[in-house]
Amino acid sequence: MLNAIDEDCATRAAEIGVRYRADQIASELICIGYGFGDRHTDEPMADWLAQVGDRQLSIVNPGINSCPSRFGHLCRQVSFVPKGAAEYFLHLGGDAGSYTQRTMRSIRAEKRKRMMMELLA
């Protein structure tokens, strides 16, 4: 059985291993629903982008449409997809869903917009 220290070490080793492999092979990172609100997540993403100039970060989030200033010169490597997760995955699969599904997604999108406007007001 792992104690808390061993568990933490195992977690860190796994993170480093994943990060190492991603540094070696990944050229695009797609983040669904991310909004640049967590510096501890932003920093590794920025480091990853900075290592190779042709890497791309795609943010799939209907409420995010601009790169934060702390990403500075990396903003040219960041693109924004103004869709919710379900809509994005359906788009990838080439299936827009049934009329009812499309209508429900549209209603949810409108509700999200209204909530965002109320929060920002």
Image (cartoon, rainbow, N blue to C red):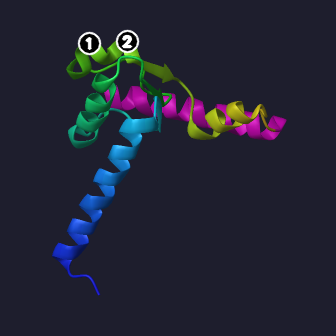
Which residue of the protein is positioned furthest toward the right in this rendering? 98
Main SS, magenta region, reads helix
Q: Depth check: give the residue in front, 23 or 33.
A: 23
120 lies above or below 15: above
What is the quadrant of the N terminus in the image?
A: bottom left
The residue pinned by badge 1 equals 73
Q: Which label belongs to residue 15?
A: none
- Report the residue at 46% width, 35% height from top: 26
Which residue of the protein is positioned furthest toward the left in this rendering? 5
Q: Which label belongs to residue 76?
A: 2
Q: Is residue 44 magenta?
A: no
In the rendered structure, which amino acid carries the disc numbered 1?
Answer: His
- Report the residue at 40% width, 37% height from top: 24
- Report the residue at 79% width, 34% height from top: 95
Q: Which residues are magenta?
A: 98-121
CA gap, disc 1 to disc 2? Answer: 7 Å
